[in-house]
Amino acid sequence: SIQAMVTMVTTVLLVLALAATTGHGFHTPASGLGGSFSHAAKRALTTRAALASPKEVSKITLLPGDGIGPEITVATVKVLETLAECKGDLSFDFNEALIGGAALDAVDDPFPEETLNSCQSSDSVLLACIGGPKWDGNPRDKRPETGLLAMRKNMGLFANLRPAKVLPQLVDASTLKREIVEGVDIMVVRELTGDVYFGEPKGIDTLEDGERVGYNNMIYKESEIDRIARVAYDVSLKRRKQLCSIDKANVLDVSQLWRDKVTSIGAEFPDVELSHMYVDNAAMQLIRWPKQFDTIVCGNIFGDILSDEASMLVGSLGMLPSASLGEPSSPGVFEPCHGSAPDIAGEDKANPLAMILSAAMMLRYDLARPDEADILEKAVEKVLDSDVRTADIYQEGEGQTMVGCSAMGDAVCSAVKELFA
């Protein structure tokens, strides 16, 4: 269920809080995460949240971005406002800011300083999606993706947590056979602020003979590997205690350092079974036998690719939330896993559920509102149980009702109201 997936992510974020504040593991039994938290877990939850206790008015920066972003943002805001109306002691102060292609069109900067200031002064950040073919021909510093990288760097968002858990209601929506995907439950822990995306030097130069050459630097410091590895090990302890580290150590020196460091840290986590896999084999194994994986830890570029691949095991990227986190006292960025889908932008065909579930994660981890997060998650599950589907998860002949983005948002709003009735 969605609740089970969220419980898993709860564990991850509690772990991340302690890893960030102490630099060491957080070794408590998984059973302690059920009905009552240990004192350490309670402290971790408080530390992780940008708010130590719930505020009556929460300041949220909205980053609709590009493509279908504005549509799913509108649907999500409507759900949050419905929740606030039903709850009574909760309200939101939304500030919409520019990022990506929309920011380029407006101010010629994919991540304006005004947007950074808004994010840093908020209790949390909700990001929809960025990018599109309109800006693909731009110089590197004028592309939407550069804005996303700048946000991660300036906000110190070093860990991306992306669950890929096949929900019972959607097991047949996957493009893979039921026997392959049923029971899949994977957590991808991706490092966000190092690797080839940030390495220097980089650029495109012209050689003496006039030929152009492009280059990037795939680089990691031991400290960067250390902090993401500790998060991944602790995640594994709260799951099935199996960690697969992805690299290309047979070819890349940086991957050899990655493998050496991840292996050495493993001595501190004797209960975790560590394995290593080359990235090309991992890409194949995720399709051939995904149930072999529990927790996967990746560098930035390998994680970028494999987390998208793992997400598609569940049937649609339109169902999966994610969290990008840095220091425990700073706001996180919560966003759906999918892209901007410019081919359906403005056609009311997008699935807003991943962003709504991202908002639920925001309520739980940045706003100290776990009960309200439960309501949103239950509302989404209630809608799925009623066989209401957007086009990406619709199955013909199964008695389902296909709706658009706006109607799906309205259905979740109605479910929220019913849960308060």
Image: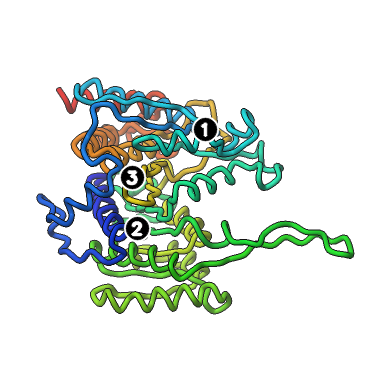
Any mark on residue 114, and which? 1
- Of tags 2 and 3, which is closer to the observer? 2
Q: Is residue 180 visible?
A: yes
Any mark on residue 187, and which? 2
Task: Provide residue 411's location: percent of width, then percent of height.
Answer: 31, 26
Disc 2 or 1, which lies upstream in sequence?
1
Q: Residue furthest right?
A: 209
User: What separation in Å lies between label 2 and label 1 (alpha carbons)?
Assistant: 34 Å
Q: Sort mark 3 into few (<14), some (14-19) or many (20+) by Cα contacts within 10 Å.
A: some
- Amino acid type, residue under disc 2 in the picture: Met
Q: Are marks 2 and 1 in contact (CB under 8 Å)?
A: no
Identify the residue at horizontal 12%, vertical 56% (top origin).
38
Identify the residue at horizontal 40%, vertical 55% (top origin).
159
Task: Provide residue 286's location: percent of width, then percent of height.
Answer: 43, 63
Q: Sort mark 2 into few (<14), some (14-19) or many (20+) by Cα contacts within 10 Å.
A: many
Task: Provide residue 30's location: percent of width, then percent of height.
Answer: 17, 61
- Amino acid type, residue under disc 3 in the picture: Leu
- Amino acid type, residue under disc 1 in the picture: Glu
Q: Is residue 421 left or right of residue 21?
A: left
Is 196 placed above or below 1 here? below
Is 394 placed above or below 260 here? above
Q: Nearer the viewer, residue 8 or 120?
A: 120
- Of tags 1 and 3, which is closer to the observer? 1
- Of tags 2 and 1, which is closer to the observer? 1
Q: Sort mark 1 into few (<14), some (14-19) or many (20+) by Cα contacts within 10 Å.
A: few
Q: Are marks 2 and 3 in contact (CB under 8 Å)?
A: no
Task: Identify the residue position indicated by label 3 in the image.
Answer: 170
Q: Is residue 81 left or right of residue 406?
A: left
Q: Nearer the viewer, residue 301 or 391?
A: 301
Does dot 1 land on a helix, a strand or a loop? helix
Identify the residue at horizontal 31%, vertical 64% (top origin).
23
